[in-house]
Image: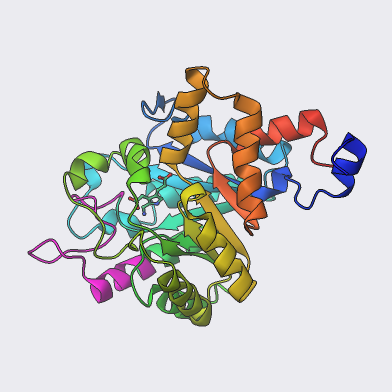
Amino acid sequence: MRRDEFSRRMMRETVLTPADFIYPVFVLEGAARSEPVASMPGVERFSLDRLLPVAERTLKLGVPALALFPVIDSAKKSLDAAEAWNPDGLVPTVVARLKKEFPELGVITDVALDPYTSHGQDGLIDASGYVLNDETIEALTKQALCHAAAGVDVVAPSDMMDGRIGNIRAALDARRHIHTRILAYSAKYASSFYGPFRDALGSAANLGKGDKRTYQMDPGNSDEALREVALDLQEGADMVMIKPGLPYLDIVRRVKDEFGAPTYVYQVSGEYAMLQAAFANGWLERDACLLEALLSCKRAGADGILTYFALEAAELLNKSGKNS
Ligand code: PBG
């Protein structure tokens, strides 16, 4: 069966298509600005005007959705993260414009406070620096409502507080945001693979030597991921996510087998940086390896993959006709 391409195709179980990808993008305040991210070669932060052509390309390539990550000026960061629910803030402004220009393109926003806190944690902290669960949930709910009012399609709480999905769902329903979907980062690990992302967001310096182990999951745990996913689904999540990707594909498989829910995986910044470094050195074959890494995520059970390679991979698939 492996001898010829026709019979390999006949028995191939998993095939990648551009519809499998979600494209994470970094957005800056102001206009006519773009900045490279040093630790993520090929990734740029764009102001809204420069993001529009990127959104158009995403749509044309058949990638169904963008995930927005804002870079907030340090003057707007604070202890209470109030900029996170400013209706005239960067995220709601960008969401409204994207939905106006490209109504068919899905727009996903991250719900977490790290771009907005002066300390770079995802939540509000007490005097000892410990993230306070219940106070944080109230803030996250205001943030999610602000995004929903701006017209976002999907809110994606990435904060790992307990009970936030239920609280956000109830608040959305109470305000008749009945079409806002929730993609819960259910099993988000306290991973060291997020380093380049924190550089991109500018939260690395604020976080300093701090880490997120009091709320993100211990990389040694697997059963706990199932408990987290079960809670988020019970509380009203439409989709769940595992993060990071390649080092955690065993978790993706368990979650998909156990719940059969729409399951996503995030190929995070550190995974992207690793591959780019190897490509730049000529140590790995670029096109083949990036598609293989993404295919493996899907084979493990993911219905979709958040990846900084989304547009490049979609282009490769479209060109080669491999997605048919
Ligand atoms: C923060 C958030 C992080 C990522 C997405 N949302 C980083 C973190 O938890 O510190 C990481 C994405 C990546 O590394 O590509 N709420």
Q: As rendered, which of 152 and 261 lies closer to the eye?
A: 261
Q: Is residue 234 above or below residue 291?
A: below
Colour scheme employed for the rendering of this structure: rainbow
Q: Is residue 173 above or below residue 217?
A: below
**Image coords of residue 14 (percent x, y):** 75, 51
Q: Is residue 24 left or right of residue 291?
A: left
Q: Is residue 134 above or below residue 292?
A: below
Residue 56: say if magenta: no
Q: Main secondary structure of the magenta part?
A: loop
Residue plotted at (65% across, 27% down): 287
Residue 124: say if magenta: yes
> Considering the image in quadrants, where does the N terminus appear?
top right
Q: Is residue 187 above or below residue 116?
A: below
**Image coords of residue 29 (percent x, y):** 37, 37
**Image coords of residue 241 (percent x, y):** 51, 61
**Callout count:** 0
Give the residues in magenta. Answer: 115-141
> Considering the image in quadrants, where does the C terminus appear?
top right
**Image coords of residue 11 (percent x, y):** 85, 50
Residue plotted at (45% across, 25% down): 277
Residue 220 in sight from this viewpoint: yes
Residue 153 in sight from this viewpoint: no
Residue at the limit of the structure toward the left, as seen here: 127
Residue plotted at (57% across, 58% down): 264
Q: As rendered, which of 9 and 140 lies closer to the eye?
A: 9
Q: Is residue 159 left or right of residue 59?
A: left
